[in-house]
């Protein structure tokens, strides 16, 4: 009986996907197709958890399933609360993503090693 239940479970097909990087989190927005061919949205928040030095990194994941009949109400609610935050705090800056090409040029050779020692780890990524 257990095997029969297991065999009936099918992975839902992802038909469209987009990821949004936001600081230490990544949000996956997946449009999935249900067994009855209906489409729904699966929002997954993935956050890297602190692991021991020698352990492989672990990720904490949380999922939210949003069905098409709820899209309008969800959008209305989300727009409302974002508007409230903007009213309270004013316009806020979007998070800037780090781009390697924006790094300042590093000196080369022995000069570079000495300069990097002075800056430390975080000084390299200004």
Image (cartoon, rainbow, N blue to C red):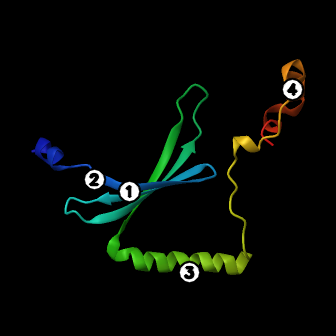
Going from the N terminus, do you reach mark 3 or mark 2 first?
2
Going from the N terminus, do you reach mark 3 or mark 4 first?
3
Residue 80 got which mark?
Answer: 3
Residue at label 4?
Answer: 117
- The CA distance from mark 1 to mark 4 is 46 Å
Of 105 and 70, nearer the camera is 105
Residue 6 lies, with reference to residue 92, above or below; the image says above
Going from the N terminus, do you reach mark 3 or mark 1 first?
1
Quadrant in which residue 112 is drawn: top right
In the picture provided, is 59 more to the left or to the right than 103? left
| The C terminus lies in quadrant | top right
Residue 16 lies, with reference to residue 40, above or below; the image says above
The percent position of residue 88, horizontal first and vertical second, equals 71, 79
Residue at label 2?
Answer: 12
Q: Give the foreground label among 3 and 1.
A: 1
Residue 80 lies, with reference to residue 101, above or below; the image says below
Mark 3 surroundings: few (<14), some (14-19) or many (≥20) residues within 10 A: few
Residue at label 1?
Answer: 16
The answer to whether the residue labelled 1 contacts the one labelled 4, judged by CB atoms less than 8 Å apart, is: no
- The CA distance from mark 3 to mark 4 is 49 Å
């Amino acid at each position: 009986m257990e095997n029969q239940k297991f065999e009936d479970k099918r992975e839902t097909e992802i038909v469209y996907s987009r990821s949004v990087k936001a600081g230490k989190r990544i949000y996956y927005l997946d449009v999935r197709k249900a067994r009855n061919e209906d489409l729904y949205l699966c929002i997954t928040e993935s956050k890297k958890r602190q692991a021991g030095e020698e352990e492989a990194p672990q990720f904490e994941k949380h999922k939210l399933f949003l069905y098409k009949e709820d899209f309008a109400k969800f959008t209305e609610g989300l727009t409302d609360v974002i508007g409230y935050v903007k009213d309270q705090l004013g316009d806020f800056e979007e998070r800037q993503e780090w781009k390697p090409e924006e790094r300042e040029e590093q000196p080369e050779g022995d000069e570079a090693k000495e300069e990097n020692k002075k800056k430390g780890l975080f000084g390299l990524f200004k």
